[in-house]
Image (cartoon, helix red, strand yellow):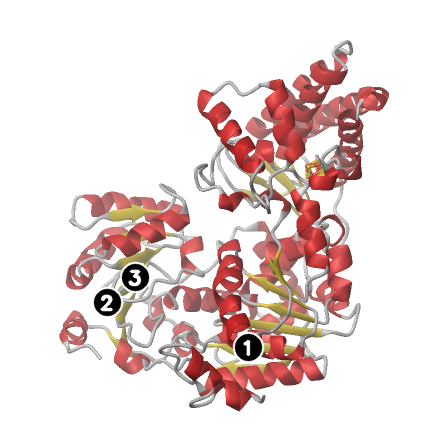
């Protein structure tokens, strides 16, 4: 069967799927992927919203019957692919292929840690104890151990880190539960599958290739598809980084305390050193200041940094020495000893001098901090990774090109050899959407900007009767806007951070007149079709914070190389983010909506055109009267 017989008018998909609309762009994508699979090529495909890119790649993969890894941007998209899209294709074509969903370690219950918590009874909160017993009962009935199955325990419950494992604390083959371990089972299933669905973080997670089963999985794959590939440069950058979080050290102290209580309660120094390490890590976090921020590693090191670092090193060293003696007492203590060695080596590395071309930085969180070495450029490492074995690599997303060029994406991942395909959206943007850039708004960097913003936004919210996403470039602006809006509008306001993202979206859809305020994660991967979302309002052009240590270092490098970092790096990255945010608006052929961008630099700056040329071709206006006319005209 050829692709026209599948995708074309009266093709198989038209016959099998109610309301399927044949799209030339979708068929073109499938043809390009079929060819890429045949010739083991690298292929970049930007498929505008509505192209139907999922079927565009799934069908040629199924037809090829090659071993494939499909990596998506998030766990939700993984579930959508596995539970919704793939079953449709399997049903239509009766393909006998085995497809397996594989998530990261933290998504599977760890039987050993459940058992240990039950025996130790260390939870003080009744709520956590009750959750532990709910989980224990479920553990006896679940086939997969995938914690998302258990809806009676909240996904952000504090219990999960205690009953799931990390590559640090997993006992591996020494574990008494190894035979029935859910992770081992999921990996074994994945090894025998024809198609494995993962997410980018799992694909790229630190040491994922060895630790999470890809050591065996990836070499067997003949095709790798990255959906939502626009996220790859950032994720690859994390993957090629070396990092250590103070949480890992804290977890080591918790496990040491639990294990020593069980198997070495005569060795008093063990809990003593574990508590000392907790105290000094806490002090070191306080020494870094109350702000939550990312900063370059100080050079030269201030005295206070030096003394805290030395104290951590000394205590870690003593802890390691005692754990070495205690290791013979139990597998758990042996695991703690190995971890202490590994973490101590990493702590020494990340508090020493960085090698050339490495960005040395740290980040602070409310209770913890991370130390990082990030490569200045990941393209060479990623290129080497692609060339390990001849296979097909597909990179697809709705937003990869800036002004119709893939150069930024190509340069960031070393994809100079890749074939390229850009497919525009089949939506009629001229009819379906209007871009509104209000007049007379001040520069968003001015102090009174948000007050003007409010006055411009309220008439639009009233016109669309809520049903709006307000997207912000910072938490501060989002929270301030929330304060301002509370007293001025009667629509339900949903604020990011007050509920899990999934729940906020569900409420937004159900309410049908809500206004949702969100920052970064709401710019991506949110799909609200129909009237519930009729308007997207963006506060300002999403340039990355110029004081970010990674951005700063890369800007300096580009300057040294003679490039203009603004035009070659900062601007194209901001364009891609704006495209993502704007892409939330029109999700279906029947959707209509208003895109309001409140940043006058979009039309008044020398670089504004780069943004405008990359947005979908919707009609444009600076007048509210035109927005009114558009909104009140009969629907399509
Ligand atoms: S093998 Fe690791 S993940 Fe599996 S039950 Fe044992 S400790 Fe937990």
Which disc number belongs to residue 438?
2
Q: Is residue 312 above or below residue 50?
A: above
Q: Is residue 505 above or below residue 586?
A: above
Q: Which one is nearer the viewer's eye here, 64 or 488? A: 64
Point 33% across, 67% down: residue: 585
Task: Give the spatial CA distance, label 2 vs label 1.
Answer: 51 Å
Task: Give the spatial CA distance, label 2 vs label 3.
Answer: 11 Å
Which sits earlier in the primary sequence, circle 3 or circle 1? 1
* Residue on which disc 3 sits: 537
Q: Quadrant of ligand 1?
A: top right
* Pointer 3 with pointer 1, Cβ within 8 A: no
Task: Give the spatial CA distance, label 3 vs label 1.
Answer: 42 Å
Q: Secondary structure at mark 3?
A: strand
Q: Position of residue 581 (x, y in %)?
A: 40, 64
Q: Which of labels 2 and 3 is toward the front?
A: 3
* Residue on which disc 1 sits: 93
Point 70% across, 15% down: residue: 261
Q: Dot 1, how many residues are within 10 Å of its Cα: few (below 14), some (14-19), or many (20+)?
A: some
Point 46% across, 81% down: residue: 13
């Amino acid at each position: 069967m050829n692709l026209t017989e599948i995708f074309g008018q009266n093709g198989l998909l038209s016959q099998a799927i109610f309301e399927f609309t044949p799209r030339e762009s979708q068929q073109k994508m499938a043809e390009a992927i079929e060819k890429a699979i045949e010739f083991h090529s690298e292929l970049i495909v930007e498929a505008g919203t509505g192209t139907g890119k999922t079927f565009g790649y799934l069908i040629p993969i199924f037809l090829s019957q090659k071993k494939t890894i499909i990596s998506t941007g998030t766990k939700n998209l993984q579930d959508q692919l596995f539970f919704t899209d793939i079953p449709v294709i399997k049903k239509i074509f009766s393909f006998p292929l085995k497809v397996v969903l594989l998530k990261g370690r933290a998504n599977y219950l760890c039987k050993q840690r459940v058992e240990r918590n039950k025996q130790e009874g260390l939870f003080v909160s009744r709520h956590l104890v009750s959750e532990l017993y709910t989980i224990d009962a479920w553990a006896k009935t679940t086939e997969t151990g995938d914690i998302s199955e258990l809806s009676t325990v909240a996904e952000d419950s504090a219990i999960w880190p205690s009953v799931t494992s990390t590559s640090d604390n997993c006992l591996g083959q020494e574990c008494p539960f190894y035979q029935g371990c859910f992770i081992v089972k999921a990996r074994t299933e994945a090894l025998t599958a024809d198609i494995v669905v993962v997410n980018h973080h799992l694909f790229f997670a630190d040491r994922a290739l060895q630790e999470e089963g890809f050591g065996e999985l990836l070499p067997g794959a003949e095709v790798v598809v990255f959906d939502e590939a626009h996220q790859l440069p950032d994720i690859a950058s994390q993957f090629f980084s070396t990092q250590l979080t103070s949480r890992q050290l804290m977890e080591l102290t918790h496990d040491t305390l639990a294990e020593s209580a069980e198997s070495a309660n005569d060795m008093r120094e063990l809990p003593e050193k574990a508590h000392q390490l907790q105290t000094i890590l806490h002090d070191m976090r306080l020494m870094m200041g109350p702000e939550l921020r990312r900063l370059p590693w100080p050079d030269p090191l201030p005295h206070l940094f030096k003394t805290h670092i030395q104290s951590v090193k000394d205590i870690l060293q003593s802890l390691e020495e005692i754990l070495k003696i205690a290791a013979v007492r139990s597998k758990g203590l042996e695991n703690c000893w190995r971890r202490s060695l590994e973490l101590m080596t990493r702590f020494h590395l990340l508090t020493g001098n960085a090698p050339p071309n490495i960005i040395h930085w740290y980040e602070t969180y409310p209770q913890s901090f991370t130390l990082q070495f990030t490569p200045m450029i990941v393209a060479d490492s990623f290129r080497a990774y692609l060339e390990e074995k001849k296979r097909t690599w597909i990179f697809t997303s709705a937003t990869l090109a800036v002004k119709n060029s893939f150069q930024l994406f190509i340069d960031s991942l070393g994809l100079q050899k890749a074939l390229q395909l850009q497919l525009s959206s089949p939506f009629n943007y001229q009819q379906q959407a209007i871009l509104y850039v209000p007049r007379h708004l001040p520069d968003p960097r001015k102090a009174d900007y948000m007050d003007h913003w409010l006055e411009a936004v309220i008439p639009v919210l009233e016109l669309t009767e809520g049903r709006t996403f307000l997207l912000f470039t910072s938490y501060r602006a989002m929270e301030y806007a929330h304060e301002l809006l509370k007293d001025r509008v009667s629509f339900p306001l949903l604020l990011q951070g007050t509920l899990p993202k999934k729940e906020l979206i569900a409420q937004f859809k159900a309410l049908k007149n809500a206004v949702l305020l969100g920052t970064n994660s709401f710019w991506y991967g949110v799909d609200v079709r129909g009237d519930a979302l009729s308007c997207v309002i963006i506060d300002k052009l999403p340039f990355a914070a110029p004081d970010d240590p990674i951005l700063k270092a890369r800007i300096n490098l580009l300057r040294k190389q003679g490039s203009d970092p603004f035009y070659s790096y900062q601007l194209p990255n901001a364009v891609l983010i704006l495209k993502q945010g704007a892409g939330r608006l029109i999700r279906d052929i029947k959707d209509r909506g208003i895109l309001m961008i409140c940043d006058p630099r979009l039309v008044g700056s020398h670089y504004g055109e780069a943004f405008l040329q990359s947005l979908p071709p919707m009609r444009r206006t600076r007048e509210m009267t035109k927005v009114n006319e558009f909104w009140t005209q009969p629907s399509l």
